[in-house]
Image (spheres, rainbow, N blue to C red):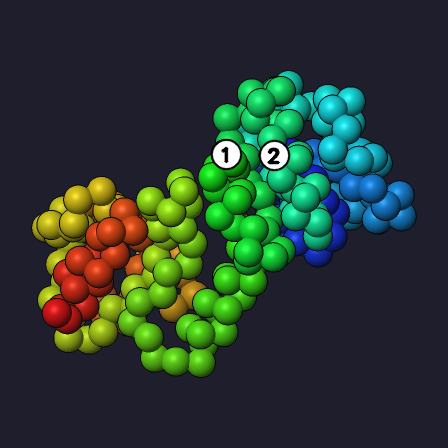
Amino acid sequence: MFIIIVGGGRVGYFLAKRLVKDKHTVSLIERDKAICEAIAKELDILVIHGDGCDPEILEQAGILRAEVLAAVTGDDEDNFIICQLAKERFNVSRTVGRVNDPKNVRAFSELGVDVPIDSTAIIAKMIEEEASFADFVNLLSFKRGKLAIVRVDLPEDSPVINKRLQELSLPPSSVLVSIIRGEEVVVPKGDTQLLPRDDIIALTLVENEQQLLNYLIGKM
């Protein structure tokens, strides 16, 4: 997949590093020349020095063939403009926008950014998860609040323990995306068996979150 990242700060850098590791083709746009030079030395990707709000710079980065654009600068207005340009002018099929101010999440979603990433909320969720024994954490909502990615920690008395995926009757429009088992990440298949203390990452309709939780951990 060809992905453009706008913003070469810590988020942009580590995102690019991860995507390259996962064998994606990446180009990155950054305003700061020194940061561009540092990233170009570190990663084998195309690095463009310029303003991601400039259509010519986006074209230099290869936006005409990009499948995804991720705007992850520290400025919400820039991220929104970049996503709008990608979507409306260059017909990029998927846009991801970092939202630094939680008050802007709704605007991003309503105005067409496919996946607004509320960085504050995600950090808060991570703190909440580490600081409590919650069985269920909503990691991310998207598609204008209709879909959610959630984490469910399976307790030892869960009714789905030792069952295989093909035996489960999940709520409508729900799917298990991955299983974190200790230090291992398991891609679920029909014969994958669920074990106690598995961390389940699932995609579901927001309205079905509670139903999914009840099914997986047996609480009403």
Image location (x, y in percent) of residue 194: 21, 61
Quadrant into which the C terminus falls: bottom left
Residue at 22% over, 66% down: 195
Q: Is residue 174 visible?
A: yes
For the image, the number of numbered tags is 2
Residue at 40% over, 51% down: 141
Q: Toward which corner of the image does residue 179 lie, by quadrant? A: bottom left
Choose between 203 and 196: the one closer to the eye: 203
Disc 2 element: helix
Q: Which residue is mark 1?
A: 112
Side of 109 where 173 appears, left or right: left
Q: Toward which corner of the image does residue 97 lie, by quadrant? A: top right
Residue at 83% over, 35% down: 50
The amino acid type, in three-letter code, at marker 2 is Cys
Q: Which residue is mark 2?
A: 83
Question: Is residue 203 depicted above or below 47 in this figure?
Answer: below
Quadrant into which the N terminus falls: top right
Labels 2, 1: front one? 1
Disc 1 element: loop
* Disc assigned to residue 91: none
Side of 48 where 125 appears, left or right: left
Question: Is residue 218 depicted above or below 209 in this figure?
Answer: below
Q: CA distance from mark 2 to mark 1?
A: 8 Å
Choose between 59 and 169: the one closer to the eye: 59
Q: Is residue 1 visible?
A: no
